[in-house]
Amino acid sequence: MSRPKTALIVDDEPHLRMYIKLILKQLGFTEFYEAKNGQEAIEMYERWTPDITMMDVNMPVKEGMEALEEIMQIDSEAIVVMTTSVASRQAVERSVELGASHYIRKDTPKDEVVNILGELIKEIWE
């Protein structure tokens, strides 16, 4: 199977979208789509079907969990990694129930995020 190249980055904070983009570039991603809320994420997912979606939990217009649920209804094979500032056990469990592939706190050190995503990519694409 070929390595993933396309990513949808969903966060209402532009600097966090840029940070995630830099990490994904380091992992070999070359095409990026950006959304600032869950509603835009759903529309972009339908249009582009990216290899991976990195999505914030707390956003205006449409929350990440709601968008995750809709994306999984569109494509049950979607690879969605939820990101958040606050990771309660309940939120992590709920995201996994809805189909998230992983859940990463935004305060996780960059090297650890790279390792987590690298392992996820190996698990799915190799």
Image: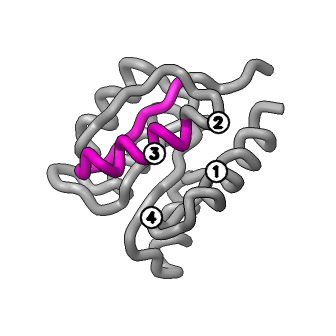
Whole-angstrom CA distance, mark 3 to mark 1, is 10 Å
Percent position of residue 22, x then y: 48, 39
Q: Residue at x 41, y 49 (%)?
A: 55
Percent position of residue 17, x then y: 35, 44
Element under disc 4: loop
**Looking at the picture, which amino acid does disc 3 mark?**
Ile
Lower sequence index among marks 2 and 1: 2
Read off the residue under disc 2.
Answer: 27
Vertical relation: 75 (above or below) 119: above
Read off the residue under disc 1.
Answer: 114
Left or right of residue 4: residue 123 = right
Q: Magenta residues?
A: 6-24
Q: Residue at x 56, y 52 (%)?
A: 99
- For the N terminus, which image quadrant? top right
**Front in this rendered view, residue 54 or 23:** 23
**Looking at the picture, which amino acid does disc 2 mark?**
Leu
User: How packed is label 1: few (under 14 Cα within 10 Å), some, or many (20 or more)?
Assistant: some
Element under disc 2: loop
Read off the residue under disc 4.
Answer: 106
